Amino acid sequence: MVRRANYKDLKELNVLGNVIDPNFSNLFNLREILKDKYSQIFVYEKDQKIIGFLHITKLYETIEIINLAVLEAYRHQQVASNLLDYMMSEMTGEIIKFILEVNVNNLAAINLYEKFGFKIANIRKNYYNKEDAYLMIKGGEGE
């Protein structure tokens, strides 16, 4: 089940955030993010346990995907796809462009985003601690 995150989820979200970066809780103050009117976090819950989340920022008609994480044991089970589907359906009509950065070596994520219609727009050199990232875009003037 996909739903919006709440304050009760903070501990689980920080643990899951460590999948993205071991320093996640220092990089992202989730309590503040949940209060921020421009940011949203969607969680994927299974058996009352958060197994994935999607963190976005919405500015005008653009959404930037900040974080997408799924526990390793639940990967390749449509969790990330369901989170993206839910977010895109929630934003129907308001949003015309989606953007994100992804490590050039993260082929699984790149394939997922391409499945959703994202295209590589540029390369950001040394974006992830000396590793390059692709800037990927869906929608906007480029389509």
Image (tube, grey):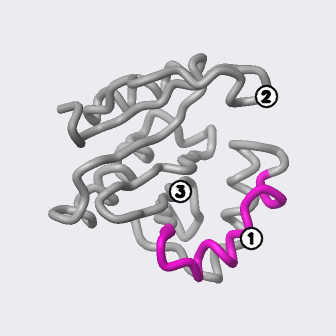
Give yes or no for contact between labels 3 and 1 (Cβ–Cβ under 8 Å).
no
Q: Point out the tag, 2 or 3, that comes first from the N-terminus.
A: 3
Q: Is residue 59 above or below residue 109?
A: below
Secondary structure under the numbered disc 2 in the rendered image: loop
Quote the CA–CA distance across marks 3 and 1: 13 Å
Residue shown at 57% from the left, 19% from the top = 104
Q: In this orientation, which residue lies closer to the viewer: 44 or 21? A: 21
Is 85 on the left-hand or right-hand side of 77? left
Say which of marks 2 and 3 sits in front: 2
The N terminus sits in image quarter: bottom left
Q: Is residue 143 left or right of residue 84?
A: left
- Please provide percent x and percent y for residue 59: 41, 63
The percent position of residue 117, horizontal first and vertical second, equals 25, 32
Place of residue 41 in the rendered image (x, y in percent of width and height, measured from the top left): 51, 66
What whole-number distance in Å separates the C-alpha atoms at marks 2 and 1?
26 Å
Give the labeled residue for mark 2.
129
- Label 3: how many Cα within 10 Å (few below 14, some 14–19, many 20+): many
User: Which mark is first along the chain, 1 or 3?
Assistant: 1
The mark found on residue 3 in the picture is: none
Could you tell me which secondary element the residue under label 1 belongs to? helix
Figure quadrant of the C terminus: top left
Foreground residue among 85 and 125:
125
Residue on which disc 3 sits? 53
- Reading the image, the residue beneath label 1 is 11
Q: Is residue 35 magenta?
A: yes
Q: Is residue 65 left or right of residue 89?
A: right
Q: Nearer the viewer, residue 106 or 81?
A: 106
Task: Please tell me whether residue 29 is drawn above or below residue 117 in the rendered image.
Answer: below
Q: Which residues are magenta?
A: 24-40
Report helix, strand or loop for mark 3: strand
